[in-house]
């Protein structure tokens, strides 16, 4: 992947995708006919097969850690860093020159100053949507800038603070994560799902040095792996009602805070990823983003993809039967994360007391004594299971030795039927880059593939090398195809993607994602630009090369979120065409990324542009490819036609927030509790 600049405003060349017109029997070329061949060749020449920078970032992370450690030790010797803890501020500690490479980002500054918190560096009370508790307010100076404090200084002794605490590789969870005062519940939902996979949580970091407060996070953006070097300074807000701390960090925290820091450090790294400052010490007109840009809500699937490098989407439980939903959860739980949100209307109707202010995640799907059950994790301070565990759950299952998770830790069991009834939206993330991060007791991975190992590397007693450590071999190795296009996608251009499985091959699973550029990266005001709706359709080639079955294999959601996702399985060798289109002829999207993952290395994926019509015909036999996801499912009676996007309300696409409550007393009580 070609990268210009870096996280704090880095730009990535990305690819383009087009769409068919209203004719249901054709996948058409450019509607300007006369220029079709010339334009088709022009667009095709702009596509390029981008290179992954994954291994290079791993190598550079270790080099950067060593360089920062050396700089801190040298600063201590000359008296500029007496406590031997790093600060990502060139005015405090001289930063080592770490420029990165052509495909990897350099290290940049992120000083503990309010100019890195507010969008474009300034607080605008007239337009800001921050809660009062989310405004930095600790010991402001004469200019009104607050004083940031180290997370490790909030404990009785800095040595008591650890990144992960005492978890081991047989642990089945890393505990609850509590949202801070920012309106970023989507990020907390994603982190909470990751916390249920301890090995996956540790993969959020390349390496770290706790004693020197150096943390190098491992994030993924626009098809590119990004290193984000941060210290442990965070801003503090006004204390919220009922808070046990006089000073409240403006970030999410572990339930074991301040002794466990990893969720807080990752939120800071994610904030730095969405912050660009032209100058490390002054506010300029070119500044974009800031920690504040994480507020204002967002999509869970985007955060899941950014944190894991996986492919994430959503579906509704009402679009499938409860038994099919259980099989889906059961088969995919080994290498997929599931975030679930309660169905507000059904819970209210039946007086099922699930807490809509906190995240829920699926932890397991199991069969027990001839029945099927789902284990759910509740991220609230106390367990909110709605009484569902008291209805039909056997005592023997709750206390089974093979499932060590307990109610006191936030886990409860529910029947598969009740799960489908009282949870409405499921966000899934296929972990295509994470290896085997399952917990003990999960069924064997179902995806065919080759086996490989990630050897661990231990640096020393204070510096830790994590993202490759202790990953269990025995999982399927996904083959990645990454394409980029620097142009503008519109109805006039119809790029397409072809997946070719050799005729002598067996079953092959394919997961593909078309990703738009993230508007959070370029925010210049608290109002974030909305992404557009892009629909991807998958067709199987039949008869002649220009003919495809009119029966669509699968499709993506058609809603205005950043990522459009499809997944299908080929039963044997065949050729599959993936097309994409927009909701209107006037829609234009700049710079898209197309990622495709196949379970067989012999698969071939190409990107190009439609240069002539493709006829959709009746299939001549059983399909050679089948749908392999619930994403894009819809009830026939809820179909809105080929040209109309699915209903989507950005205001309700979030965990419930206190501002939605009509009763002021209830708002204050729950609101302060949920963001403390």
Image (tube, grey):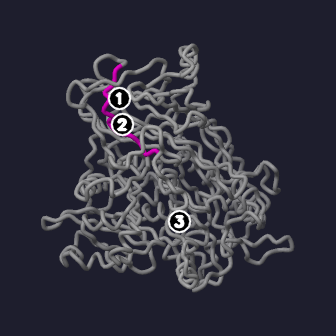
Name the residue that disc number 1 marks: 576
Residue at 75% in and 65% down: 114
Check the picture and name the quadrant holding the C terminus. Answer: bottom right
C-alpha distance separating marks 1 and 2 = 13 Å
Q: Is residue 343 left or right of residue 156?
A: left
Image vertical order of residue 260 relative to residue 88, above or below: below
Residue 400, percent across and down?
21, 73
Image vertical order of residue 159 relative to residue 100, above or below: below
C-alpha distance separating marks 2 and 3 = 32 Å
Q: Residues within 10 Å of mark 1 (few under 14, many from 20)?
A: many
Farthest-out residue, left = 370
Residue 95, percent across and down?
73, 54
Check the picture and name the quadrant holding the N terminus. Answer: top right
Name the residue that disc number 3 marks: 185
Residue 419, percent across and down?
30, 66
The image quadrant that residue 448 belongs to is top left
Front tag of 1 and 2: 1
């Amino acid at each position: 992947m070609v990268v210009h600049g870096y996280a704090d405003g880095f730009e990535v060349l990305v690819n383009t995708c087009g769409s068919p017109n209203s004719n249901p029997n054709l996948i058409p070329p450019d509607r300007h006919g006369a220029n079709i061949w010339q334009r088709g060749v022009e667009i095709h020449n702009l596509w390029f097969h981008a290179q992954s920078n994954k291994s290079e970032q791993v190598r550079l992370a270790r080099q950067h850690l060593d360089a920062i450690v050396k700089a801190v030790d040298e600063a201590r010797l000359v008296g500029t860093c007496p406590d031997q803890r790093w600060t990502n501020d060139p005015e405090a500690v001289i930063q080592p020159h770490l420029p990165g490479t052509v495909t990897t980002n350099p290290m940049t500054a992120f000083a503990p100053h309010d100019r890195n918190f507010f969008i474009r560096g300034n607080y605008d009370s007239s337009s800001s949507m921050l809660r009062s508790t989310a405004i930095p307010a600790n010991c402001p100076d004469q200019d009104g800038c607050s004083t940031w404090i180290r997370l490790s200084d909030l404990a009785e002794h800095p040595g008591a603070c650890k990144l992960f605490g005492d978890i081991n590789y047989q642990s089945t969870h890393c505990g609850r994560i509590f949202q801070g005062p920012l309106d970023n519940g989507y990020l907390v939902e994603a982190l909470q799902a990751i916390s249920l996979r301890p090995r996956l949580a540790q993969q959020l970091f390349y390496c770290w040095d706790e004693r020197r407060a150096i943390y190098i996070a491992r994030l993924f953006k626009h098809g590119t792996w990004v290193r984000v070097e941060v210290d442990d300074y965070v801003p503090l807000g006004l204390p919220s009602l009922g808070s046990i701390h006089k000073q409240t960090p403006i970030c999410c925290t572990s339930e074991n805070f301040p002794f466990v820091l990893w969720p807080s450090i990752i939120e800071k790294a994610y904030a730095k990823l969405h912050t660009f400052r032209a100058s490390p010490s002054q506010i300029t007109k070119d500044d974009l983003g800031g920690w504040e840009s994480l507020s204002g809500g967002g999509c869970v699937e985007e955060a899941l993809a950014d944190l894991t490098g996986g492919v994430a989407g959503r579906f509704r439980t009402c679009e499938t039967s409860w038994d099919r939903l259980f099989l889906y959860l059961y088969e995919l739980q080994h290498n997929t994360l599931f975030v679930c949100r309660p169905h507000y209307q059904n819970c209210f109707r039946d007086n099922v007391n699930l807490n809509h202010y906190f995240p829920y995640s699926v932890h397991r799907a199991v069969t027990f004594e001839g029945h099927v059950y789902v284990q759910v994790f509740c991220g609230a301070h106390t367990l909110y299971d709605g009484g569902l565990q008291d209805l039909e759950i056997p005592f023997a299952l709750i206390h089974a030795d093979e499932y060590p998770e307990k109610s006191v830790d936030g886990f409860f069991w529910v029947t598969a039927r009740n799960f489908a009834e009282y949870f409405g939206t499921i966000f899934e993330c296929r972990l295509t880059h994470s290896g085997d991060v399952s917990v003990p007791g999960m069924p064997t991975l179902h995806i065919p593939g080759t086996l490989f190992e990630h050897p661990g590397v231990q640096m020393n007693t204070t510096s830790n090398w994590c993202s490759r450590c202790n990953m269990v071999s025995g999982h399927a190795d996904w083959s990645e195809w990454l394409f980029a296009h620097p142009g503008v996608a519109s109805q006039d251009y119809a790029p397409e993607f072809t997946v070719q499985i050799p005729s002598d091959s067996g079953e092959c699973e394919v997961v593909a994602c078309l990703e738009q550029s993230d508007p959070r990266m370029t925010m210049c005001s608290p109002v974030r630009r909305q992404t557009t709706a892009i629909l991807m359709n998958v067709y199987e080639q039949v008869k002649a090369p220009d003919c495809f079955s009119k029966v669509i294999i699968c499709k993506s959601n058609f809603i205005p979120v950043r990522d459009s996702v499809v997944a299908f399985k080929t039963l044997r060798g065949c050729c599959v065409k993936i097309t994409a289109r927009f909701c209107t002829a006037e829609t234009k999207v700049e710079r898209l990324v197309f990622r495709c993952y196949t379970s067989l290395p012999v698969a071939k994926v190409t990107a190009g542009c439609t240069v002539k019509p493709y006829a959709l015909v009746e299939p001549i036999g059983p399909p050679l490819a089948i749908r392999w996801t619930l994403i894009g499912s819809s009830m026939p009676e809820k179909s809105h036609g080929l040209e109309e996007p699915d209903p989507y309300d950005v205001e309700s696409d979030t965990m419930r927030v206190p501002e939605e409550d009509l009763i002021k007393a209830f708002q204050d009580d729950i609101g302060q509790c949920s963001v403390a």
